[in-house]
Amino acid sequence: MSIARIGISSSVQGEERLSTSLDNISAVTQAEGLPFVLPNVGVSQACAYAEQLDGLYVTGGGDIDPNLFDEDPHPKLGEITPERDRFEIAIIRAFLQRNKPILAVCRGVQILNIAAGGDMYQDIYAQSEEEKQMLQHMQRAPRNHRSHAILLTPSSKLAELTGVTDGYVNSFHHQAVRELAPGFEATAWASDGTIEAIESMDHAFVVGVQWHPENLLQAKDGMAKRLFLSFVQACRKPNVG
Ligand code: MN
């Protein structure tokens, strides 16, 4: 069986560079995938990548342009990178069309949901109901610290893959999935009701998580390890549909 070729989406660094963390690269190589860091290029290249690659890893990063779901920017919206949004939406749709595996983390789960027709909170603290007691989702602890609890849907693919129905995760976000895309289900929640994972009901492997499992691998986090292993394994299987 040939090695799975995994596209890794990249952050925009100022106006001159792209970047991705080394944890993203080693998450793929540790699971025995072959990493390809993708520049934020055009829609036609996004389709060409979807033909060439076996799996797509949509990484974390900054905020997402609310124009993508027909909203004006909220005052709490942070820095956005429209060319990254555009490219990721195109490549996510190209992978969905081909029923090829997608794993999305943090910002990735939000752009996945938007690409498939859902939306998000621009700022969970400013936009959730007033009486709701929110927990701290932008942790001030190190990246490999699991700061808050999550509960998984026991019947979900995520629970099946990871072998658990609860756990602790790290958290570096102030945005989150709001309205789910058609064909998607929420499969993990924080105690304040924030959606922490989603998956497609219509695809073989399309999973998004709101935390950063790539930063938990060195801490020997079993859930993170099984997530990347099962993703790369899914990319190795022949694709149907
Ligand atoms: Mn969180």
Image (spheres, rainbow, N blue to C red):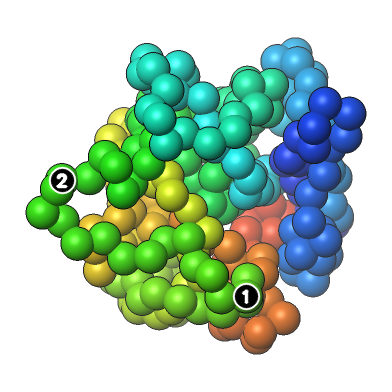
**Camera-nearest residue between 221 and 48:** 221
Residue 187 seen: no
> Farthest residue toward the right?
16
- Whether residue 103 appears in this view of the structure is yes
* Quarter of the N terminus within the rendering: bottom right
Residue 30's label in the rendered image is none
Question: Mark 1 and mark 2: span between their CA atoms?
Answer: 29 Å
The C terminus - image quarter = top right
Secondary structure beneath dot 1 equals loop
User: Quick one: 109 or 199, which is closer to the camera?
Assistant: 109
Q: Residue furthest front?
A: 75
Crowding near pointer 2: few (<14 within 10 Å), some, many (20+)? few
Residue 25 shown left or right of residue 146 in the figure: right
The residue under label 1 is which amino acid type? Pro
Q: Is residue 213 above or below residue 237?
A: below
Would you say the beta carbon of the disc 1 residue lies within 8 angstroms of ligand 1? no
- Residue at 56 percent across and 75 percent down: it is 141
Judge left or right: residue 165 versus residue 193.
right
Q: Which residue is mark 1?
A: 142
The foreground one among 58 and 228 is: 58
Q: Which residue has dot 2 on it? A: 129
Residue at (39% x, 74% y) in the render: 148
The x, y position of residue 151, in whole percent, is 30, 71
Q: Position of residue 43 (x, y in %)?
A: 70, 15
The residue positioned 72% from the left and 30% from the top of the image is 50
Nearest to the observer: residue 211 or residue 102: 211
